[in-house]
Image (spheres, rainbow, N blue to C red):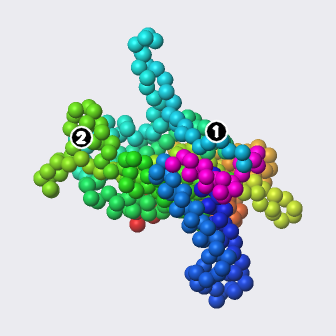
Amino acid sequence: MLIEDHLAKLDDKMEKEVQKAAKRFGESFDEAMFRATNPRVLEQQQKRDEIHTRFAKALNDNNLDDLRQIIVDCEIVCPISGTRNWTEVRQFNLMFSTEMGSTSDGAMKVYLRPETAQGIFVNFLNVQKTGRMKIPFGIAQIGKAFRNEIVARQFIFRMREFEQMEMQFFVAPGEELAWFEHWKAFRMKWHQSLGFGAEKYRFHDHDKLAHYANAATDIEFEMPFGFKEVEGIHSRTDFDLSQHEKYSGKKMQYFDPELNKSYTPFVIETSIGVDRMFLSILAASYCEEALEGGESRVLLKLPPALAPVKLAILPLVKKDGLSEKAREIMDELKFSFACQYDEKDSIGKRYRRQDAIGTPFCATIDHQTLEDNTVTIRYRDTMEQERVSIDSLQRTIADKTDIKKLLKQLSA
């Protein structure tokens, strides 16, 4: 992490040089030419490449002494204390161990799972045969995982107990790298479809691969404390199924009717931390806006498909039959999506409360509603308003908040 952060600082220095030049030269600026010829950028790039080459080699050779020497040579300081008085680099145990057994003498050492994947591999044939699945296909699940983090920090970004969603996608041998590229692109498309800006995401290819992998990358999101991993995509080869087969003595092979032969499938894994995903969405959505007249508002610009509350139903006042009409609308719509009813305080204060929890739409019931059966929809992000009929309200909100619409865009 220390060395990767140092490399990121060198990248930032080069990026600042490029941005300054782009501002100076305007539309005539050629970024590729500038990066290839500017002495300061070339110097920083050469320094970065040398450090990165040493770093990747030390990781893959498991050379802890050289990792420490890179830290010393780069004059990397502790980000907390500012000291350079480093200990030796050591291996840490990232798994939680415990004992299983009714007596201490006969207890067996077991480990809390550091990932949710192995349950999928154990059940691979069961799912494939009962579901009559043909390769390629995937199995996904969500569950708790545990890691013995050296330092749990950065709010809920790094925790010892966390929620993980994983998919193991089974493919024919030899096709895994093509599917790896497919899932890289598709998962990045999902993240970017949330609307926070493509510049907020980037890939980070692994310098050191796990012993079971032949390709691996992370999707990183720009958190308030820098670009950090939210999802990992890995080509796990046939390691997991073949290991379970070896130690269980049970065949874990798939019979391919088109090839008329059996083989152990290869696996592409996508693994995403639910807590990290939540943190990235919360961090990107939180805004404080200055309004006309010196006022301000706090709002969460949550993607409508992910917002917990889709619609707030607000009678303008609590008299003249408006509350009753609002309750009638609430009772009709609450079966379609999560709604909130609020009649306390001024309409402005109620709008602010809904902004703060990320409700994308508010429907205001006023005296005109009683005359023509229309309501005012107020949009959270722009604060614009439009008049719609009550009959079309359900369809209008569903069209803008249904996650199926988001998913259809991905498959288009």
Which residue is at 54% across, 46% downward?
64
Which residue is at 68% across, 48% downward?
357
Estimate the x, y position of residue 369 in percent, counting from the top left.
Answer: 66, 57
* 59 sits to left or right of 23: left
For disc 2, the marked residue is 252
Q: In this view, does 107 lie above or below 274?
A: above
Q: How crowded is mark 2: few (under 14 residues within 10 Å), some or many (20 or more)?
A: many
Residue most extreme to the left:
260
* 57 sits to left or right of 155: left
Report the quarter where the C terminus lies. Answer: bottom left
Estimate the x, y position of residue 220 in percent, counting from the top left.
Answer: 56, 57
Q: Magenta part of the protein: which range?
A: 63-83
Residue 236 in magenta stretch: no
Which residue is at 65% across, 41% downward?
87
Q: Nearer the viewer, residue 174 or 208?
A: 208
Q: In this view, does 27 lie above or below 370?
A: below
Estimate the x, y position of residue 309 in percent, counting from the top left.
Answer: 61, 48
C-beta proximity under 8 Å, tags 2 and 1: no
Residue 79 in magenta stretch: yes
For disc 1, the marked residue is 151
Estimate the x, y position of residue 177 in percent, counting from the top left.
Answer: 34, 60
Instruction: Give the amino acid type for the residue marked by disc 2 in the picture.
Output: Met
Q: Is mark 1 on a helix, strand or loop?
A: loop
Q: In this view, does 44 lie above or below 344?
A: below
**From where the camera sits, is residue 374 visible?**
no
Instruction: Give the amino acid type for the residue marked by disc 1 in the picture.
Output: Val
Q: Which of marks 2 and 1 is nearer the N terminus?
A: 1
